[in-house]
């Protein structure tokens, strides 16, 4: 094996911390997220009474073990919440097939947190490789990365670096963009690609770690008076990847150390890949000389996703999961969940987990039902003003007509549609909505809602107009 990621080799002396970003860190993060969702799902009181004491014992392949202090609690939680916990876990991590709830970890299933998460496509366990590849998510390869307008440049740069590390102009490669847009995915993909064999007969060693992990290791080295080893270890790699560099802001000593490592590596002709949530010039709080050096290679932006890209991603993920998801459901998700790919993926996983759990096909109805809480959060983002504007544009009338007293059909109908949409897409009350339409009474709004609902049932062209508007407003 020519490929090595030293940061998470099992048995390394590095500390095990909650904030560790190795496979155990990933698992711990998932568990935190599952707990938060559980709490949301069952409410604070129930959560505190029954679920707060559930602890994560570990993962063994596709099986997770949770433990509770008493048998009574174990029986109760398994019976009352077992299915829910499993569904939420599967939504969080599609590779989990079974969640075992026990009073203590059974023999033979001792926590094996270094196990990499395994994608659904590869149910087999990678045996001896776990120690080497543990921190890299198996699902994060170039093959599984869906390319579209918003990310094609970053993708091309990542490909280029994977093919020819340390090429002039591409060193350092600085990838930046908002949360959940694929930065980590691309970094892992580069590492996977480089692991596919030696370059020019020489083994390539890659170190991938989050900036946070970098800091922990550095602090640990200071404490153990082993900074020299740490430096040498870092400086011996061919490719150094630091994820989420923004974490180093305000951590001056660590920044300093990183700066020196960075310079040493670049001077020695090694490749550096960095990710952050902002461009080098926007990362305020970073030392100027570091910022300057970061910007001297290739800077590639991962833009917010478009509707088309979201659909492509959903299609790819559904195929991988081997689940039949109707086009209508994908469109619905792609319209609703626009912020980032992680949430989009989470929603799809949840639908799939639900369908598996209850052995029912994925439909638009189940999507509404299962994603109720997620969607509610999105719905609140549409304002009455936006609705009025879009509807007015659609029928070519002035926005001011939404509040005017005129009652001629060509303005009254759009106004009714806007009221109807305001009721559907916002959480505003009828009187509230009325006030936003030239101080109309809530009964007028009620009438508008009833009128539009009736028309949708009888006039297909009108129904299509309304549906189109709804979609535009939701996207
Ligand atoms: P970031 O590091 O930018 O916050 P990640 O790389 O962790 O985001 O991506 C979040 C999730 O979305 C991951 O599961 C990743 O596989 C998925 N993802 C993001 N972009 C894409 C894409 N273009 N194609 C397929 N999956 C993607
Ligand atoms: Mg990331």
Image: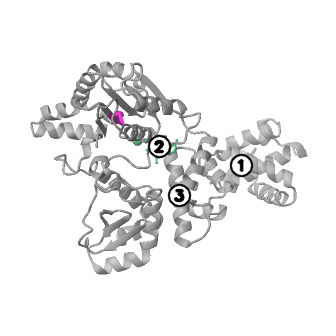
Mark 3 or 1, nearer chain start: 3
Query: Is residue 249 visible to the viewer in this orientation of the structure?
Result: no
Task: State which quadrant residue 286 falls in.
Answer: top left
Q: Residues within 10 Å of mark 3 (few under 14, many from 20)?
A: some
Where is the N terminus found, in terms of image quarters?
A: top left
Indicate yes or no: mark 2 CB to ligand 1 under 8 Å: yes
Position of residue 333 in the picture relative to residue 103 (left or right): right
Mark 1 touches mark 2? (CB < 8 Å) = no
What percent of the width, then of the height, locates residue 423?
70, 54
Task: State which quadrant residue 475 falls in.
Answer: top right
In three-dimensional space, the C-alpha distance between marks 3 and 1, rounded to whole angstroms, equals 30 Å
Figure check: 347 above or below 172: below
Q: Secondary structure at mark 3?
A: helix
Residue under the image location 84 percent in, 51 percent down = 462
Query: Is residue 450 visible to the viewer in this orientation of the structure?
Result: yes
Residue 245 drawn in magenta: yes
Figure check: 117 above or below 237: below
Q: Which residue in the protein does label 1 denote? A: 470
Q: Which residue in the protein does label 2 denote? A: 180
| Stretch of the chain drawn in magenta | 241-246
């Amino acid at each position: 094996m020519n490929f090595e990621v030293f940061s998470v080799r099992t048995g390394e002396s590095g500390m095990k911390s909650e904030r560790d970003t190795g496979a155990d860190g990933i698992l711990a993060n998932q568990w935190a997220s599952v707990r938060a969702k559980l709490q949301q799902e069952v409410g604070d009181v129930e959560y505190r009474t029954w679920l707060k004491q559930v602890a994560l014992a570990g993962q063994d392949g596709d099986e997770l073990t949770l433990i509770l202090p008493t048998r009574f609690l174990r029986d109760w939680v398994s019976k009352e919440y077992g299915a829910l916990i499993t569904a939420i876990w599967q939504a969080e991590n599609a590779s989990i097939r079974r969640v075992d709830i026990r009073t203590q970890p059974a023999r033979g299933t001792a926590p094996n947190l270094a196990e990499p998460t395994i994608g659904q496509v590869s149910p087999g366990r990678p045996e001896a490789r776990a120690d080497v590849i543990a921190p890299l998510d198996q699902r994060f390869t170039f093959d599984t990365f869906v390319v579209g307008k918003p990310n094609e440049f970053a993708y091309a740069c990542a490909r280029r670096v994977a093919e020819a590390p340390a090429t002039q102009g591409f060193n350092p490669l600085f990838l930046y963009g908002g949360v959940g847009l694929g930065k980590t995915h691309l970094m892992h993909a580069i590492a996977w690609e480089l692991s596919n064999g030696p370059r020019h007969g020489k083994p390539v060693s890659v170190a991938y770690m989050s900036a946070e992990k970098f800091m922990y290791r550095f602090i640990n080295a200071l404490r153990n008076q082993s900074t020299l080893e740490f430096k040498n270890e870092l400086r011996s790699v061919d490719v150094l990847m630091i994820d989420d560099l923004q974490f180093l802001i305000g951590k001056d000593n660590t920044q300093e150390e990183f700066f020196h490592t960075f310079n040493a590596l670049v001077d020695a002709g090694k490749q550096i890949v960095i990710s952050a949530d902002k461009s080098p010039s926007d990362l305020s709080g970073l030392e100027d000389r570091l910022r300057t050096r970061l910007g001297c290679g290739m800077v590639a932006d991962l833009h917010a996703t478009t509707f088309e890209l979201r659909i492509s991603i959903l299609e790819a993920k559904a195929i991988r999961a081997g689940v039949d998801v109707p086009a209508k459901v994908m469109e619905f998700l792609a319209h609703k969940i626009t912020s980032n790919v992680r949430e989009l993926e989470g929603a799809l996983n949840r639908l799939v987990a639900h369908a598996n759990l209850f052995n029912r096909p994925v439909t638009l109805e189940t999507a509404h039902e299962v994603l109720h809480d997620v969607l509610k959060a999105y719905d609140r983002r549409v304002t009455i003003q936006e609705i009025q504007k879009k509807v007015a544009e659609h029928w070519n009338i002035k926005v001011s007509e939404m509040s005017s007293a005129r009652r001629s059909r060509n303005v009254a109908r759009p106004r009714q549609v806007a009221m109807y949409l305001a009721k559907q897409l916002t959480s505003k009350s009828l009187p509230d909505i009325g006030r936003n339409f030239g101080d109309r009474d809530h009964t007028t709004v009620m009438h508008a809602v009833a009128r539009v609902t009736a028309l949708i049932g009888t006039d297909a062209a009108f129904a299509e107009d309304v549906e189109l508007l709804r979609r535009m407003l939701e996207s």
